[in-house]
Image (cartoon, rainbow, N blue to C red):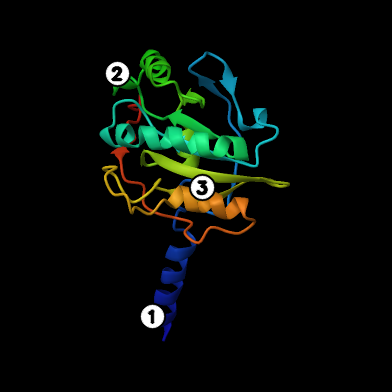
């Protein structure tokens, strides 16, 4: 009996002290940030006084998946910025590990493609860690509330990484449309498929 009690205690202890997975989950309140945009100005969510929420998209220059989704990210901003849900794009990668994602190359990309949304660089990677982004692209749909920016959806833009399936399921569009209609998204979490984040090497 004593042995059983000890085993139960160990099992409970292992659950109680299991470290939580990092990053925001649906229902969490996301902390605001201040990051440098490609135009050199600092941008935070607080700058968007009239926004109803945000589409925070971790993306980059070099990743084939990010390139495949680039047009769709631009379309999301055109569809929803005027309705209160602008795209806020963040490049999370260490430019030393991936030179194509340098600030200068971000500026070139944004200019060439005529981005209608900010393209921010997370130089310290602190924001990327806080959100728990694991791939590019990785989307976090936030809804502005009296208590802060609440996470309503996390994951992929849709289920068509190649951009060739006309009957794809548009996860992000469906989630934003639900919020605009005063409802909660039916699908709140999917797996983000893309390139891994290129982290800075520890000193």
Say which label, 1 or 2, has the lower sequence index: 1
In this picture, residue 67 sits left or right of residue 115:
left
**Residue visible at 41% across and 41% down in the picture:** 138
Say which label, 3 or 2, has the lower sequence index: 3
- Dot 2 corresponds to which residue? 99
Q: Position of residue 139 (x, y in %)?
A: 45, 42
Residue 132 appears in the figure: no
Q: Label 1, secondary structure: give it.
A: helix
Q: How crowded is mark 1: few (under 14 residues within 10 Å), some or many (20 or more)?
A: few
Question: Depth check: 67 or 41 in front?
Answer: 67
Q: Label 3, secondary structure: give it.
A: loop
Circle 1 or circle 2, nearest the eye: 2
Q: Label 2, secondary structure: give it.
A: helix
The image quadrant that residue 195 belongs to is top left
Question: Depth check: 100 or 198 in front?
Answer: 100
- Dot 1 corresponds to which residue? 3
Image height of 152 relative to 125, above or below: below
Say which label, 1 or 3, has the lower sequence index: 1
| Farthest residue, direction bottom | 1
The image quadrant that residue 93 belongs to is top left
Residue 109 appears in the figure: yes
Distance in Å between CA atoms under marks 1 and 2 = 57 Å
- Dot 3 corresponds to which residue? 24
Image height of 7 relative to 66, above or below: below
In this picture, residue 67 sits left or right of residue 56:
left
Distance in Å between CA atoms under marks 3 and 2 = 28 Å
Circle 1 or circle 3, nearest the eye: 3
All told, the count of numbered labels is 3
Q: Where is residue 3 in the image (x, y as percent from the top left)?
A: 38, 80
């Amino acid at each position: 009996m004593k042995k059983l009690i000890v085993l139960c205690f160990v099992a409970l202890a292992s659950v109680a002290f299991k470290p939580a997975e990092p990053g925001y989950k649906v229902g969490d309140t996301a902390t605001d940030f201040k990051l440098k945009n490609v135009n050199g100005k600092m941008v935070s969510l607080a700058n968007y006084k009239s926004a109803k929420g945000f589409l925070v998209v971790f993306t980059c220059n070099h990743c084939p998946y990010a390139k495949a989704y680039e047009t769709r990210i631009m379309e999301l901003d055109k569809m929803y910025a005027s309705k209160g849900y602008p795209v806020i794009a963040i490049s999370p990668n260490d430019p030393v590990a991936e030179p194509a994602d340098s600030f200068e190359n971000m500026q070139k990309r944004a200019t060439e493609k005529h981005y209608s949304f900010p393209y921010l660089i997370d130089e310290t990677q602190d924001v990327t860690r806080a959100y728990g982004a694991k791939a590019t692209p990785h989307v976090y749909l936030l809804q502005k509330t009296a208590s802060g920016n609440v996470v309503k959806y996390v994951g992929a833009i849709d289920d068509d990484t190649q951009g060739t399936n006309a009957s794809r399921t548009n996860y992000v569009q469906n989630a934003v449309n639900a919020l605009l209609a005063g409802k909660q998204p039916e699908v709140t979490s999917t797996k983000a498929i893309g390139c891994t984040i290129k982290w800075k090497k520890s000193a």
